Amino acid sequence: MSECLLFKNGVHIDTNELWNVCCAPFSEVERPKFNTYNEYKQFAEPKYEQSKTEWIPGCSSCKYSEDTKNQSLRTYCNSELQHIAPSNKSIKWAIINTGSICNLACRMCGPGCSSKWVLSLKNNNERFDRNEIASYMPGLDIRDVKVYSQETMSMIYENVLTPELRYVSFAGGEPTQNYRTEEIIQYLIEKGYARNMKMHIITNATRPFKDSWKDVLDEFKDVEIGVSMDGTHDNYNYIRHGANFDEVMENIFDIKDQMIKKGRNLKESLSITYCLQALNAHKFSYDKDYYESKGIGFDYVVIHDPDYTTLA
């Protein structure tokens, strides 16, 4: 079974403001990305019909996940979107990476998703030759910090942030530090759409979940917070450069307490999002047990890029 409803009812806008189907982390073939919503839909809708009978090139991440874990982004989305009428092609499921603003330089990441990485390259420019810097991202300008333009925001308002939307996921960069993320959330709340939606956010939790972010727990029908934690203790500090494990755990426990006080189902509203890679494979079982012993759900993806972080 390869049918994927995301080709019909989903969209992903990445940190470069390009439109695609989803945020699949790796593939042997890269799916095309588009500058506008209309271009994306012209590509995606025929691909949905094709997905009913075969795996689409560029979808090997979900296939790998299903072969190894019997679940994937595809299976999760299909279960959530299965009641939508076949004729309804509106955007129900949106993954929005509002920019590259981030206060960490994680070792498996890069300048495309982290302004801290860009800063590190800029401050150490003399240590790298041009080809090495270019290898991180074609056309990279180390002065760049990416945030959605008003043109992209206008397309999102018109085609994505509508009463039809039922699920929105924010990632980055670090979405809690990006004003575009807060702008979108406030719009969804003010329009009343949030009451019928699930909001998912992937955060590094290096900053307390307070002020306007605290209000989100009241306004959205469902809330799901995935905290990016790729290790524990000193190994975490090494992988997630710029973070402090003990401080982040305090913030996670605070989020957990808030969820409980709000009457949220903890199993469905808070979990660890873990990147299994060369730097933490030796502690994977320990890390999984550690987080689960704290009453926090645990999920993982396998890193396939860059090469030096893979399990191989």
Image (cartoon, rainbow, N blue to C red):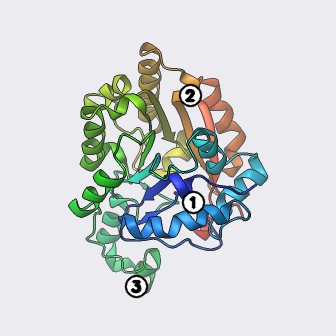
How far from the left and from the top, in percent, is residue 62?
Answer: 67, 56
Marks 3 and 2, how far apart at CA: 46 Å
Q: Closer to the camera, 213 or 302? A: 213
Q: Depth-wise, is mark 3 or mark 2 nearer the camera? A: 2
Kind of element beneath mark 2: helix
> Of the residues under marks 2 and 1, which one precedes in the sequence?
1
The residues bearing labels 2 and 1 have C-alpha atoms spaced at a distance of: 23 Å
Residue 268 numbered tag: 2
Using the image as rendered, state which of residue 230 and residue 198 is in the foreground: 198
**Vertically, is 222 above or below 61?**
above
Q: Between residue 231 and residue 41, name the one nearer to us.
A: 41
Q: Which mark is residue 291?
A: none
The circle on residue 129 is 3
Amino acid at circle 1:
Pro
Q: Residues within 10 Å of mark 2 (few under 14, many from 20)?
A: few
Which residue corresponds to the image point at 64% horizontal and 28% vertical from the top-left?
292
Q: Which one is closest to the eye, mark 1 or mark 3?
A: 1
- Element carrying mark 3: loop
Image quadrant of residue 274? top right
Split into 4 quadrants, where in the image is the N terminus?
A: bottom right
Spatial separation of the CA atoms under disc 1 and disc 3: 28 Å
Q: Which residue is mark 1?
A: 25
Q: Where does residue 303 sit, x and y in percent of width and height?
A: 62, 58
Relative to 32, residue 79 above or below: above
Q: Is residue 226 left or right of residue 111?
A: right
User: Of label 3 and label 2, which has the lower sequence position?
Assistant: 3
Task: State the quadrant of the C terminus.
Answer: bottom right
> Mark 2 and 1 residues: CB-CB less than 8 Å, in contact?
no
Q: Amino acid at mark 2?
A: Glu
- The front one of 74 and 124 is 74
